[in-house]
Image (cartoon, rainbow, N blue to C red):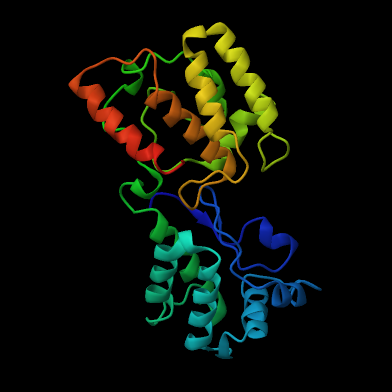
Amino acid sequence: MACKADFLGEERTRRATLKPISTCCNIPEIGEEEPLAECSIPKLPGPCNDVQCVFEKSGFLNDKYSLNKEAYKKHLLKWLDSHEEWKDAIDKAIKDCVDRDLRQYLDYPCKAYDVFTCTGIAMLKGVIPDNSGEALCGRPPVDKPFECCKLPVLFSDEDRAECGLPGREEPRKGPPDCAKNICIMKKKNLMKDDENLDLDAVSAFLDKYTEENTEFKETVENAKDICLKENLPGPPGICGPSKVISCLFFEVFHNCPTWEKSEKCDKLLKHINQCRAKFV
């Protein structure tokens, strides 16, 4: 699979939750607030009891050992009404976790945990194909894409390496990693907190960049107008900072003032435009 998920991550240490936690994909909370709150005071120890409490309070279980399939399916479809971008993921979750008999994930029976874990895995697979990452716009179809756009370095390879990111000419494996992107933005003091970009700081950072690289000033200004927004559109499953970084990259490449014309670069530009369309 393209990215790993920690379904019992840090979020679950604080309160009951039905939010699958992933290093790359920001899947929204799928539980309802009332049962989550009821099961958080006090929060029962995991991995089974806390999830089972939420399932019981939500009416998702017939008994400890069997899922109320209609109730759980109805809940997922209701959740989908306000999260339409997750349709493929929810369809897969229903197919894999409601319509089929499930494997037992723990050493002891816990139907709620089995269904929750299956749902998280299915949702990740529904948004990120196992072998390509195309749902999030995969790696460029050519080697050394910066030969097509002579874009001056924005983040040094040293900074990238310290955050676990590949060098800019190295192929990326899998979808954007939110934690690594946030790391490099923090290095430049571009984050308000652990989750949200400081858009004003990003704008000022890019202004300084174009002072030193004047041929990109107009291109970067256009990219800022499009990408430096709260609630930026984009593929489901990636966090806000990763959306902004991706959007800026695609916009600058799309309007690159130093573009090299060649068969290779034409192929890359087609790919860039397909990716760019996901963010505008």
Left or right: 53 in relation to 140? right
Q: How many marks?
A: 0
| In the image, residue 33 above or below residue 251 | below
**Most distant residue in the bottom direction:** 62
Image location (x, y in percent) of residue 47: 62, 70
Q: Residue at x 55, y 42 (%)?
A: 178
Image location (x, y in percent) of residue 89: 42, 64
Q: Residue at x 18, y 22 (%)?
A: 263
Viewer-side residue, 251 vs 96:
251
Viewer-side residue, 235 vs 141:
235
Image location (x, y in percent) of residue 42: 80, 73
Residue 166 seen: no
| In the image, residue 122 above or below residue 275 | below
Image location (x, y in percent) of residue 31: 62, 71
Hey, which quadrant is residue 274 in on the image? top left
**Most distant residue in the right direction:** 41
Hey, which quadrant is residue 125 in on the image? bottom left
Residue 92 seen: yes
| In the image, residue 203 above or below residue 45 | above
Left or right: 13 in relation to 175? right
| In the image, residue 165 above or below residue 2 | above
Viewer-side residue, 151 vs 232:
232
